[in-house]
Amino acid sequence: MTRQNLLAAADALHRARAERVPIAPVSTTFGVTSAEDAYAVASLNTRRSLAAGARVVGLKVGLTSKAVQQQLGVSQPDFGVLLDDMAYLNGDTLPAGRLMQPKVEAEVAFVVGRELRGERPSWGEFLASLAYALPALEVVDSAIADWKISLVDTVADNASCGVFVLGDQPVALGGISLRDIGMQLSKNGGVVSIGTGAACLGHPLRAAYWLACTMAERGETLAEGAVILSGALGPMVPVAPGDLVHADLGALGSVACQFEAEARP
């Protein structure tokens, strides 16, 4: 596709998020048909954010559920960029004016302790690069109206990144079986989603390893201190202003946030 179409798709997605008005799928409106073109669109908006003063603080892995992969007709995950203004901590209140169509999912987050760059890492090199794990909430938020997305639509929209919330207490990787941890997500006191570590590509570490290998193949670096959101442990749940969300991830701990009741003037 032409660079003019790439730029037009990026502009439309940027405007949709700035004005909080969802748009029609960019796959049909602008003819974005391949994953690589979609990543190029997302990269244009990342560069726009960096030029405005944002910093990249990590990456997210999406489409780690086999059921969702089958729904979108793909056989592997996708990824998006995490910026510093997306990051919140356990117990924070999230601004209502930031999001359009938010949905929450509980995840395992990893923090890189040793920079990964260059060649595809071995499994051992990858494990040695991680400092610890944290419980996390990802608030996904599509700029595409009614979440009517294809693979290229979510990739172009930076893997439907919204914001994310990290737990307080880091946990050593060798201390627990992340594949076997249970997850229970509650909204306003009622359980709305359950799952396990195995729901995330069979094991959260496998999802994060896919990301590390993908970044190496693309010639990109996983920096020291970078956050990796490894993917959902159970079904995502729509949320509204005022909702209180709490996720219990067993031995990994818990994490919570509240959505602001209404946008500030």
Image (cartoon, grey):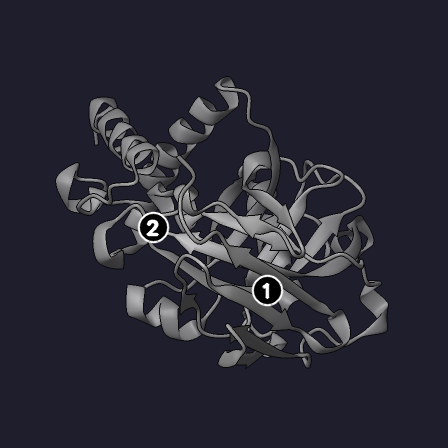
- Relative to 133, 196 lies left or right: left
Q: Give the CA separation, mark 1 to mark 2.
A: 18 Å
The residue to which callout 1 is attached is: 107
CB of mark 1 within 8 Å of CB of mark 2?
Answer: no
Q: Is residue 259 above or below residue 216?
A: below
Q: Position of residue 231 (x, y in %)?
A: 54, 62
Label 1 sits on a secondary structure element that is strand
Q: Say if residue 219 shows up in the picture.
A: no
Q: Nearer the viewer, residue 116 or 173?
A: 173
Q: Residue furthest front?
A: 265
20, 198: nearer the viewer? 20
In-front residue for pair 242/229: 242
Q: Quadrant of the N terminus?
A: top left
In the rendered image, which quarter contains the C terminus? top left
What SS does tag 2 mark?
loop
Rendered position, 100 above or below 134: above
Q: Using the image, determine if residue 202 lies above or below residue 55.
A: below
Q: Which mark is residue 142?
A: 2
Residue at image x 48%, y 45%?
95
Q: Is residue 71 left or right of residue 179?
A: left
Q: Residue at x 54, y 75 (%)?
A: 186
> How busy is the neighbourhood of tag 1: few (under 14 within 10 Å), some, or many (20 plus)?
many
| First of labels 1, 2 by sequence position | 1
| Badge 2 density bin: few <14, some 14–19, many ≥20, Cα 10 Å | many
Horizontal and vertical percent position of residue 82: 55, 41
Q: Amino acid at mark 2?
A: Ser
- Name the residue type under label 1: Glu
Residue 39 locus on image (x, y percent): 39, 39
What residue is rendered at 57% in x and 51% in y? 93
Where is residue 114, by image quadrant? top right
Residue name at image x 55 percent, y 20 percent: 53
Left or right, 76 with respect to 205, comes to left
